[in-house]
Image: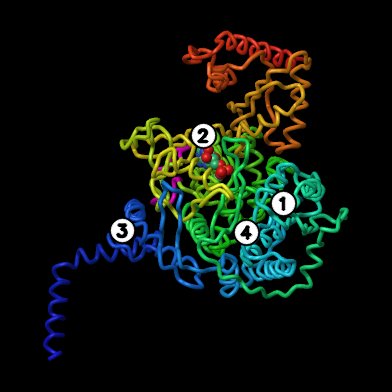
Amino acid sequence: MLQPRVKASKCLVSAFKRVFRPSLQVWARRRCNVAAIMPEAAGFEGVSDHNNLQEYSVSNSESFWAAAARQRLSWIRPFHTVHDCDLSRGKIRWFDGGKLNVSVNCLDRHVHACPERVALIWEKDEPGSEVKVTYRQLLEMTCRLGNLLRRRGVRRGDVVTIYMPPCPLAVASMLACARIGAAHNVVFAGFSAQALADRIRDAQSSTVITVNQGVRGGKVAELKRTVDTAVHSCPTVQQVLVAMRTENPVAMTAKDVAMEEEMLQEDVVCEPEAMDSEDILFLLYTSGSTGTPKGLVHTQAGYLLYAALTHRYVFSYHDGDVFGCVADIGWITGHSYGIYGPLANGGTTVLFESTPLYPDPGRYWEMVQRLKINQFYGAPTAIRLLLKYGDRWVQKYDRSTLKTLGSVGEPINTEAWEWYHRVVGDGRCTVVDTWWQTETGGICISPRPSGPDAEIVPGMAMRPFFGIKPAIMDPEGNVLASNHASGALCLSQPWPGMARTIHNNHQRFVETYCQPYPGYFHTGDGASRSEEGYYQITGRLDDVINVSGHRIGTAEIEDVVNQCDAVAESAVIGYSHEIKGEGVYVFVVLKKDVEVDEAELSRQLNVMVSKKIAKYACPDCVQLVQGLPKTRSGKIMRRVLRKVAERDFNSLGDLSTLDDPAVVQKIIQGHRDRSKKEQQQQTP
Ligand code: WTA
């Protein structure tokens, strides 16, 4: 009975092949092409190039992300639900039912495959003194530290605050938290004691990890002393683990633990916790439009998958490449592309401790030559700064290993983009201007992935990543469907890397990101879409400014300025700054009978802001005014102040709703007098 059937079916197959051979070949080629673009997508029907892979990832997001999660992550238990999200309520869940451990994904599986591969290259402040750490060594360090934290009472779900410069022990600290199920809260080591204390208190951390001293640009920073001051006002803190970055001893208190000494007593094997996909991996504080920074929460599986996938495909990272992200670990870029993305991919990643100007403006490129960096990822502010020093600092060094150059954190102007491309990349590297946020967890809009020859327009983030569907909104909340549109940038559907909530304040998360355009994720940025459908980011639409690529809320600075004895009220705004992108401009109304000149007030405010927030947030300009432009209901009209700071006096717009329109002319006059004085001081 079977025989004829087989025969018949064989006949049928050959007839089918004769008729359909050409299309079968096309189909086979399509499968083959898509596997070359992204092996995870090999089974997707009808996908042949980047464009339709992107379309597929958006319209079949479940099957896209399921395939990616199964293939790219190692699971202890598989997930049963790909996603369960309701953006309008801020409910975001990915890979429910799944269990995994992030440190196992970043370390153990690579140690099994290639233990001696270099995981980290610590580019210390002193040039030429890099330290290489293999996957085996990093796992050992992480396990010892995981055991130490466990022995000292840190439990699953606790939040550990890390106040350290980029160094292998900082990475091991983050991964040790992940190993034992604690969440980490890395605070940028440039933040002041008060900013650190605010973050420790909000996170309710009982453990802080730090170093005795930091070293940056040849200068020593007393980080342990800053932690001591912060901890005074943090009753939750029970212990401070102190690693030794320099050989200089520091005063130790009863709470302090000599970290490296104690680590040596620990075992090199540390049982990883089986974490649920939606357990917290970390908190990271960032500025919003109110005075209080928000602790954005990222969870395990979705974040790691998104960081890994974007790292591989945006930068075209291949096994054996050396990835050089120069962002500090205290920012999301350091988390996703300094650590988690590269390590999840088994890559080699550089931890940069120094500054672009130390010991000279050739630092980045000397490092590229010495470490043979293949992908370099930096900030426009540094590019703008370096281009001022001229091409010779770049051309001195061999940059032939470079393949991709990335930019992040703020819009990159065409001049800086062109210089990056032409001089740094010798005109042959792919430049990717990547748009994303602490909230998005990873890159959402970028020129790549796309076909290797696909067009890249200078200074444009261009194309949404797989699974990302941007929408541009008008002020009434209508989606602008056509090309050649500009408005508020929203993301129309959830993606695995997005933040889940704000620590201790889900209501603020919903109000900030979900309610402004119900059903959409509101980014706070403006964007335009060109005729060709490419995206360009135009900047923040809220009261957040971007100084040297660092976010800061104007309200945070105003809070500090208003604490100054001489100040009655103030308004802080951002204005275009040649190097920093945006500078901080402060308009101040003095209290009655107080006499202080602008220079002296500016000195006082600089001290206060660096003490209470960080140096990068210090005012660039302080202008004394008799009154602020306010509406009759008392709201400061910041739009007018922005125009004044930009010297755009002829397009102030409608001033009819101002309580006292005369105030504006006085502010303009004050601004002119100020500029004149500055010019006089500059001319010898
Ligand atoms: C801005 C940094 C223009 C934007 C990863 C965003 C950008 C904020 C770009 C997030 C870019 C980031 N072009 N603007 N390529 N990348 N931004 O949270 O305003 O520190 O909202 O994350 O930086 O800053 P954050």
Q: Earlier in the sequence, mark 4 or mark 2?
A: 4
- Mark 1 lies on a secondary structure that is strand
Residue range highlighted in magenta: 445-460
Q: Is residue 324 visible?
A: no
- Mark 2 lies on a secondary structure that is strand
For the C terminus, give its image quadrant.
top right
Q: Disc 3 to disc 2, how far (Cα)?
A: 36 Å
Label 4 or label 2, whichever lies nearer to me, is: 4
- Mark 4 lies on a secondary structure that is strand
**Residue assigned mark 4:** 183
Q: Residue at x 28, y 66 (%)?
A: 28
* Scheme of colours in the image: rainbow
Q: Is mark 2 within 8 Å of ligand 1?
A: yes
Question: Is residue 523 depicted above or below 82 in this figure?
Answer: above
Check if mark 4's residue and mark 2's residue have beta carbons within 8 Å: no
Q: Earlier in the sequence, mark 3 or mark 2?
A: 3
Q: Quadrant of residue 587?
A: top right
Image position, residue 657 (x, y; %): 49, 14
Image position, residue 199 (x, y; %): 67, 47
Q: Earlier in the sequence, mark 3 or mark 4?
A: 3
Q: Disc 3 to disc 4, how far (Cα)?
A: 39 Å
Main SS type for the magenta part? loop
- Mark 3 lies on a secondary structure that is loop
Image position, residue 504 (x, y; %): 59, 49
Q: Which mark is residue 540?
A: 2
Q: Disc 4 to disc 2, how far (Cα)?
A: 29 Å
In the rendered structure, the answer to whether residue 7 lies left or right of residue 654 reads left
Q: Residue at x 75, y 55 (%)?
A: 237
Q: Which mark is residue 47?
A: 3
**Residue assigned mark 1:** 163
Determine the quadrant in which ligand 1 lies: top right
